[in-house]
Image (tube, rainbow, N blue to C red):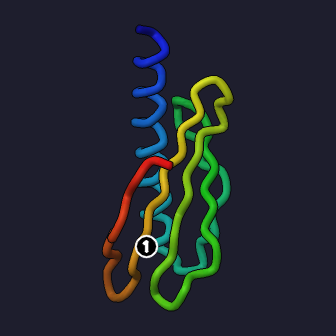
């Protein structure tokens, strides 16, 4: 139904925000998260201090009706290596 479609659309949106956040993190090791605004809405990215070269990004929608969150674990060396990407 409609709720399932909206939920799937929201997950795609959050994945897009996660892609944006990874690009920002790749460009700057100092990127600490914040809000990302896209045409579909706004999402929040949290990037706590890394544990060595491994860090975790948590990306959530600000939409309270169809809230979705993904967590990405990345190893940053000369390149970014995604070791985990899951909905939580």
What residue sits 39% from the left and 80% below the top? 75
Percent x, y for residue 81? Answer: 31, 75
Residue denoted by label 1: 26
Q: Is 12 on the left or on the right of 62, as rendered?
A: left
Percent x, y for residue 73? Answer: 43, 69
Q: Quadrant of residue 74?
A: bottom left
> Up-down: is 18 above or below 78?
above
> Up-down: is 77 above or below 6?
below
Mark 1, secondary structure of its residue: helix
Q: Seen from this angle, which residue lies furthest front?
A: 88
- Which residue is more in the foreground, 8 or 26? 8
What residue sits 50% from the left and 59% below the top? 21
Percent x, y for residue 72? Answer: 44, 62
Question: Which quadrant is the N terminus positioned in?
Answer: top left
What residue sits 64% from the left and 30% below the top? 63
Q: Is 32 on the left or on the right of 78, as rendered?
A: right
> Up-down: is 66 above or below 44?
above
Q: Quadrant of residue 30?
A: bottom right
Percent x, y for residue 29? Answer: 53, 80
Q: Residues within 10 Å of mark 1 (few under 14, many from 20)?
A: some
- Which residue is more in the foreground, 66 or 38? 66
Q: Is 29 on the left or on the right of 87, as rendered?
A: right
Q: Seen from this angle, which residue lies furthest top?
A: 1
What residue sits 46% from the left and 53% below the top? 18
Number of numbered discs overlaid on the protein picture: 1
């Amino acid at each position: 139904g409609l709720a399932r479609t909206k939920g799937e659309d929201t997950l795609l949106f959050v994945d897009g925000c996660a892609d944006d956040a990874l690009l920002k993190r790749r460009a700057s090791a100092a990127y600490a998260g914040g809000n990302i605004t896209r045409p579909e809405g706004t999402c929040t990215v949290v990037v706590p201090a890394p544990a060595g070269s491994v860090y975790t990004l948590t990306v959530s929608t600000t939409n309270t009706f169809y809230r979705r969150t993904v967590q990405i674990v990345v190893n940053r060396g000369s390149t970014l290596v995604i070791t985990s990407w899951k909905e939580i």
